[in-house]
Amino acid sequence: MNKLYALKEFTNDLKVRNLAKSTIESYTYQLNQFLDYCQGVPQTINVPKIREYMLYLKVDRKYSPSGQNIAISAIQDFYNRVLQVEWPKKIIGRPKVENKLPIILTQDEMKNVLAGIINLKHKAILSLMYSSGVRTSELLDLKPEHIDSKQMYVMVRGGKGYKDRSTLLSTTCLNLLREYYREYQPQEFLFNGAKGACPYSATSLANILKKAVKKAGIKKKISPHTLRHSFATHLLENGTNLFYIKELLGHKSIKTTLVYLHLCSKDIKKIVNPLDKLFGEGGL
């Protein structure tokens, strides 16, 4: 089995399992890099070589623990499913991922970001993304018919894990979308790209958000996913049940949604510090 044949078999297996396009691209890329590094036929690659490659990713390529884990998952999938060799889990192991809290924008910061956008299309894009909590890929795949103004929800088709779900449609955002629709007359996708029939690009989305945040004078390091985190946190701060938030976000497990408890400032501010309870805020 040579490299080209190995990659073809691996990609076909990923497609048969109906994995997300982004996962297929990521796993194929990681396996391609691994095979290039090893410079040998896949069947001869052993545990020491895999360990050496993991060290190379960490030291030379500066991969984060999350990035290393993606590479391991790709190689493991290839070994188990294409080579049909048992993965030496206990020998290789995985790097521990840092448990970092996501960055969010406060409600005031979010208001300033959106209020400062002049371009109608850009304002509609970011307003819908924030008010619905959809992922970037989900937003770019939206079509006009996915906006249900009667039931007041946004229908997400084939989200992560190829699951359909509905999420919130803001009245404010709906009015903005109607204005946008009248002016731009989108056809295939709700937000068309420069070529018309194609969806808006993820790079363009990131750029308009970056400019809007900079214009608002915010120094935080953000990404489009920050809007999703902010959506969930603000819902929690406004008293929305955590299980409702889980469904709106399309999380498989409530454990994933629990991270927003750590970001919610409303209830934390109500907690009385035990030292203040003993002596009052006047001090010792």
Image (spheres, rainbow, N blue to C red):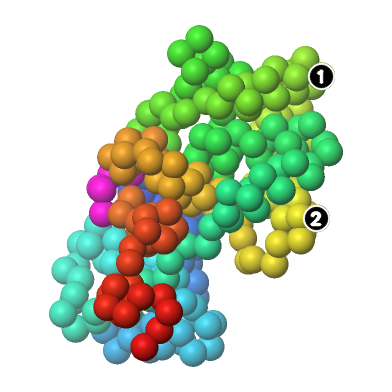
Residue topped by disc 1: 183
Binning the other alpha carbons within 10 Å of mark 2 as few (below 14), some (14 to 19) or many (20 upward) gives few
Q: Residue at x 79, y 31 (%)?
A: 120
Mark number for residue 57? none
Q: Tell me if 172 is positioned left or right of 169 in this view.
A: right
Foreground disc of the pair 1, 2 = 2
Instruction: Using the image as rendered, state which of residue 281 and residue 59 is in the foreground.
Output: 281
- Where residue 25 appears, x then y in whole percent? 49, 54
Corner quadrant of residue 2: bottom left
Element under disc 1: helix
Q: Nearer the viewer, residue 101 or 47?
A: 101
Residue 252 in magenta stretch? yes
Q: Amino acid at mark 1?
A: Glu
**Which sits in the foreground, 230 or 119?**
230
Q: Which residues are magenta?
A: 250-256
Q: Residue at x 76, y 32 (%)?
A: 121
Q: Which three-letter amino acid code belongs to the residue tagged 2?
A: Lys
Q: Tell me if I can see residue 173 in this picture.
A: yes
Residue picked out by circle 2: 215
What residue do we see at 42% from left, 54% from top? 266
Q: Position of residue 214 (x, y in %)?
A: 77, 59
Q: Quadrant of the C terminus?
A: bottom left
Query: N-terminal of the two: label 1 or label 2?
Result: 1
